[in-house]
Image: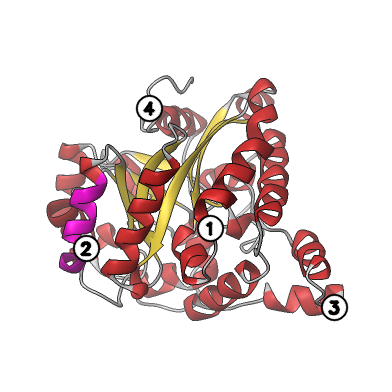
Amino acid sequence: MAQPPLSARFDSLPKAELHLHLEGAIQPATAQTLMARHGVKATEQEVLQHYAFRDFPGFLGTFKWVTSFLRVPKDYAHVAQALAEHLLGQNVAYAEVTLSVGVMLRRKQQAEANFEALIRATEPFERRGLRLRWVFDAVRQFGAEAAMAVVEAARRCASKAIVAFSIGGDELSLSSAEFQQVYERAAELGFHRLIHAGEVGGPEKIREAIELLGVERIGHGIAAIKDPALMDFLAERKIPLEICPQSNLSTGALARQLSRENVRLEDHPLPALFRHGIPVVLSTDDPALFQTTLRGEYAHAARMGLRESELEQIRTMGFHYAFQPDARV
């Protein structure tokens, strides 16, 4: 299918991105720089091989590998600046960036020092028209105690730039019920609540996240297409799905949810979910690992058959469902 062109007018409009991992935005050249900084030699080809995963476990392995070179606050500052430049190049005016604090703590790093460094590094970008806010993320398979430690790290940072707490990782590893107290604590501290659900798990993972944990947006959520009653529920409650098409294709999540091989981006349920009345926001997830951009994701959505007027609605939703009240459209 030929890719419909997006108008220059639409391309020039400011956009928001709400599902974006800092660590997943580390480009191969940046990874090589970090490796050299820590005395690890690798050729460009050797680095690129790590980015050539073919399924969800492979993606998790690559994510673990690339984050292993984020060791000191200066490293976080470096990659945050690189991401900010990239976002400005995509006409992004507002972004909520997920930070894998659970990984930091597991590696015995000082989360507060890392966070302070990246805040200082990205402050100048606000004057250039980019507002960055941060989501502190725990890793599901690390367990509830480790997740609670992430919430408490966010509390200690005491920054208005931290807008939410989230859990990512392997959604099939532990039940949602194990994290109820963690999400209650996050709400008590005033953090918005997010989770990855219905990416590789079934629709029940989405419903559990909402009913047990009180989450306000769902990361991915493409499994909703399997459950018409859940689709009605999401539409009625106006609970947004953070849709990342290229990610879903690259990790095999799309093939898993559609129960078939050789799927294409045109098979993605984004149009059906959106036209059912479910709020959706379009994002890149891990743009370096999935070799995508926000412009590219809007182009993918056009390939799926969404009209530019519909893409305009999705663009607007990115600001409307942001956790920063005065995020501009």
Label disc, if present, on residue 320 of the rendered structure: 4
Q: Amino acid under label 3?
A: Lys
Q: Which residues are magenta?
A: 176-186
Q: Amino acid under label 1?
A: Gln
Distance Cα–Cα, label 1 vs label 2: 23 Å
Residue 160 position, x and y percent, is 43, 31
Q: Is residue 40 left or right of residue 76?
A: right
Q: Earlier in the sequence, mark 1 or mark 2?
A: 1
Q: Which residue is mark 1?
A: 110
Q: Are marks 3 and 4 in contact (CB under 8 Å)?
A: no
On the question of residue 228 being in view, the answer is no
Q: Is residue 36 left or right of residue 85?
A: right
Q: Are marks 1 and 2 in contact (CB under 8 Å)?
A: no
Query: Closer to the observer: label 2 or label 4?
Result: 2
Residue located at (52% from left, 63% from top): 104
Distance Cα–Cα, label 1 vs label 4: 33 Å
Residue located at (25% from left, 69% from top): 202
Using a 10 Å C-alpha cutoff, classify the residue at mark 3 as few (fewer than 14 neighbours), some (14 to 19) or many (20 or more): few
Distance Cα–Cα, label 3 vs label 4: 45 Å
Label disc, if present, on residue 179 of the rendered structure: 2
**Is residue 231 inside the magenta stretch?**
no
Q: Amino acid under label 4?
A: His
Q: Which residue is mark 3?
A: 41
On the question of residue 32 being in view, the answer is yes
Residue 10 or 160: which is nearer the viewer?
Answer: 160
Vertical position of residue 100 compared to residue 96: above or below: below
